[in-house]
Image (tube, rainbow, N blue to C red):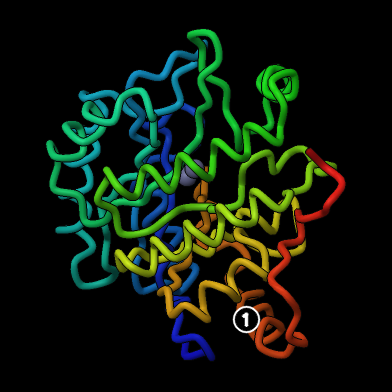
Amino acid sequence: MPNHFNIDLTADGHVHTRLCGHADGAMKEYVEAALRAGLRKITFLEHLEVNIHTRRKSWLTTDDFAEYFRRGRQLQKEYRSRIDIGLGVEAGYNPQAIESLQQSLARYPWDTIGLSYHFYSLAGLHYNMVGRNRDHIAALKAHGLGRVAEDYFSGLIQALEHITCDKICHLDAVMRHVPAFKFNSSHLLLIDTLLESMQAKGVALEVNTAGFTILDHPHPCPQITKKAIRLSIPLVVGSDAHHPTQVGRFFDRLPDWFQSLRSRPKSPFQPDKFSQIRP
Ligand SMILES: [Zn+2]
Ligand SMILES: [Zn+2]
């Protein structure tokens, strides 16, 4: 579907399956859902994490990835004439395991690599910065959410130096389940640096429609997306589906949303989660 910013809304570039341990549905069910949604392409972006210590694993093991590629290749053949199927990865950054992550990524023939940063390390355990788990949020709060978000953005900037990737996923999702938390001016500067680095490296920005489940916009917020557009950073769309019914979710809202970006009056760069109040 053509639109103002040349974004392909017929391709869902970010879906999970039950292989990751926290999503429902087999790969085939996602492909069928994509066909029902009228999509031209679906890209699986399964979770790869290295050296993360949490109570519950939410990513694929080596065996899971073997199964992922085996099934994925079968489906690519089976659906060849009906839909394009991509086999990608959502690589979770871990500043303590950069080399292991590079090695794991080099092991597979990914169609696309999305870079995310999910887990924050505190006293030998990892806590999810983008999830809704209350215990994790409490631990991160105790450490200081301002500091966590600063480390999150610095981490992504550092990650871009070490990890070759095609896009950054849900860029502003850090502490998204703490509505009262706002970004401060240091976060803002880091976001600027991150976008400039993406521009320099030709890394795309994911417009992640899971944002619509908790906000009135996708990730990232309008101001960050507008800034990316000004920098000519390519935008790609993903639903971050964790259930087949979520494939292509909220894509129908995107033409109007992109239109609203265009028509908003010019204002200084100031993300929605920005305020001067928070540390
Ligand atoms: Zn993610
Ligand atoms: Zn995801």
Tell me the residue at 45%/72% (across/down).
235
Q: Tell me if 29 is positioned left or right of 212 in this view.
A: left
Image-quadrant location for residue 264:
bottom right
Q: Is residue 48 above or below residue 41?
A: above
Tell me the residue at 46%/39% (across/down).
155
Q: x and y percent of residue 19 in the render?
A: 37, 32
Q: Amino acid at mark 1?
A: Phe
Which part of the image, by quadrant, shows the C terminus?
A: top right
Q: Which residue is mark 1?
A: 258
Q: x and y percent of residue 240 in the render?
A: 51, 51
221 and 249: which is toward the camera: 221
Q: Is residue 51 above or below residue 260?
A: above
142 and 91: which is toward the camera: 142
Q: Tell me if 243 is positioned left or right of 257 in this view.
A: left
Q: x and y percent of residue 166 in the render?
A: 30, 59
Tell me the residue at 61%/58% (across/down).
219
Helix, strand or loop under label 1: helix
Image-quadrant location for residue 251:
bottom right
Q: Tell me if 125 is positioned left or right of 35 in this view.
A: right
Tell me the residue at 47%/67% (across/down).
237
Neighbour class for label 1 at 10 Å: few (<14), some, many (≥20)?
A: some
Q: x and y percent of residue 72 in the render?
A: 22, 47
Q: Tell me if 265 is positioned left or right of 87 in this view.
A: right
